[in-house]
Image (cartoon, rainbow, N blue to C red):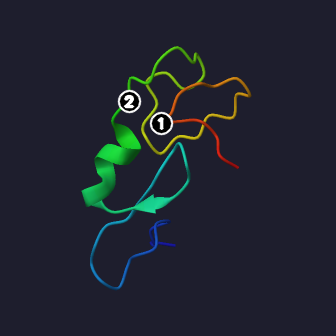
């Protein structure tokens, strides 16, 4: 029972899982998943990273507006 709960990648690159969108990302994509975007008046997605999709019906933010 000495195994890590995080699976190792064959290519040796560390992959992280985003808390906001759930995607795995590499160190080169850290800013997109961790740095807040100052997007505007929507109270749900304010200061969330660029990968976040706001599910608020009236969100007017071009970065976070849900497109599903």
- Secondary structure category for the residue under label 2: loop
Few, some or many residues within 10 Å of mark 1 (<14, 14–19, 20+): some
Identify whether 31 is placed above or below 5. above
User: Is residue 12 toward the left or the right of residue 59 in the image?
Assistant: left
Q: How many marks?
A: 2
* Mark 2–mark 1 distance (CA, rounded to whole Å): 8 Å
Q: Position of residue 59 (x, y in %)?
A: 63, 25
Identify whether 4 is placed above or below 62. below
Q: Residue furthest bottom?
A: 10
Mark sitting on residue 37: 2
Few, some or many residues within 10 Å of mark 2 (<14, 14–19, 20+): some
Q: Position of residue 62 (x, y in %)?
A: 50, 33
Residue at horizontal 70 percent and vertical 49 percent from the top: 68
Residue pointed to by mark 1: 63
Q: Position of residue 36 (x, y in %)?
A: 37, 30
Foreground of the two, 1 or 64: 64
User: Is residue 68 toward the left or the right of residue 46 in the image?
Assistant: right
Mark sitting on residue 14: none
Identify whether 28 is placed above or below 60. below
Residue at horizontal 45 percent and vertical 72 percent from the top: 2
Foreground of the two, 16 or 44: 44
Foreground of the two, 15 or 8: 15
Foreground of the two, 1 or 43: 43
User: Do the numbered discs 2 and 1 sit on residues whose CB atoms are within 8 Å?
Assistant: yes
User: Is residue 66 toward the left or the right of residue 23 in the image?
Assistant: right
Q: Nearer the viewer, mark 2 or mark 1?
A: 1
């Amino acid at each position: 029972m000495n195994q890590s709960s995080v699976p190792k990648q064959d290519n040796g690159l560390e992959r992280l899982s985003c808390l906001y969108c759930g995607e795995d990302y590499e160190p080169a994509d850290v800013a997109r998943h961790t740095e807040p975007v100052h997007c505007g008046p929507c109270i749900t997605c304010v200061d969330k990273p660029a990968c976040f999709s706001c599910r608020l019906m009236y969100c007017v933010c071009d970065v976070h507006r849900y497109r599903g």
